[in-house]
Image (cartoon, rainbow, N blue to C red):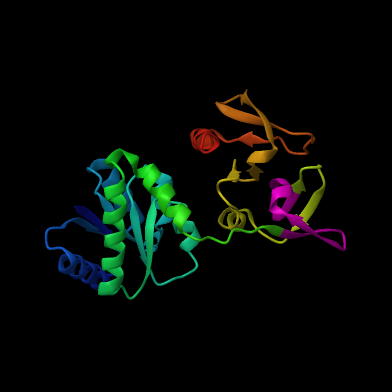
Amino acid sequence: MNILIVEDEQLAQERLQLLIKAYDPLINIAGCLESVEETVNWFNTKPHPDLLLLDIHLSDGESFEIFRQTNIQKPVIFTTAYENYAIDAFQLFSIDYILKPVTTEGIAAALNKYKNLSAAFAPKDYQLLMEQVKDNFSVNYKTRFLAKVGQRLFFIPATDVAYFAADNKIVFLIDKEGNRFVINSTMEKLETELNPKHFFRLNRKIIINADSIEQVKPYHSNRLKLQLKGISTLEEIIISRERVAEFKHWADN
């Protein structure tokens, strides 16, 4: 097994190497990296490891940026001092989330999980492996939203949402009847709170509910345009060019 460690603290790097070797001396440490930039360059130029041990806060930013800049289809064990990134982590190919300080028991449990999951899937089936992990990981996605029109407040079930739209710093919830409400949130926060099986961020300003989509049409500049079921929209529901491939994958699963 080849493992790549991405950790910007020297002592933490050395500790992870010792814990891994104590677990199994035959494991090969493919490298120890410290930054987002260094890791992106590594994945773009070298064979990918079997497993990635990844800290979240690196010297030049959060490690989630690595996945936006390169195509990594390998499982990840996150190691971090922060609890509040767990949901973000499990949107990726994460099989475990270890809080620092990393212990012998913690690393052993994570590597055992990797071995057990790997044994159940062929190497090419990493996507299936990750879906299995996510299905077994309990995430409490939001089921309703407190929304307002003027001074009136409403409880809107997530299943009644057609889409969310951002206008400057205001985020609107539009329900499946076309009613428009203001909610106290951001698009970034909504991404972590919504079930990704049902909701997808089309661009900087729109998050869509799959159940509200009626039709997808080609649009200029290699983008796509959505037509929604039974409602007219103030916004054009456009899928940005950068998100078209990911949208098609999401829509087909």
Based on the picture, tell me whether residue 127 belongs to the magenta stretch.
Answer: no
Percent of width and height locating residue 86: 47, 63
Instruction: Give how far across and how far down residue 214 sits, in percent.
Output: 69, 31
Give the quadrant of residue 35. Answer: bottom left
Most common SS among magenta residues: strand
Boundaries of the magenta span: 145-173
The residue sitting at 79% across, 34% down in the picture is 230
Percent from the top left, x then y, of residue 58? 36, 63
> Residue placed at 22% from the left, 43% from the top?
47
Q: Nearer the viewer, residue 117 or 19?
A: 117
Q: Is residue 167 magenta?
A: yes
Q: Quadrant of residue 170?
A: bottom right
Q: Please give the name of the residue rendered at 57% of the width and 61% of the height, measured from the top-left corner.
A: 140
In this rendering, is residue 15 above or below 197? below
> Which residue is at the far right?
151
Image-based side of 126 in relation to 137, left or right: left
Q: In the picture shown, does residue 186 fall above or below 225?
A: below
Is residue 8 in sight in this rendering?
no
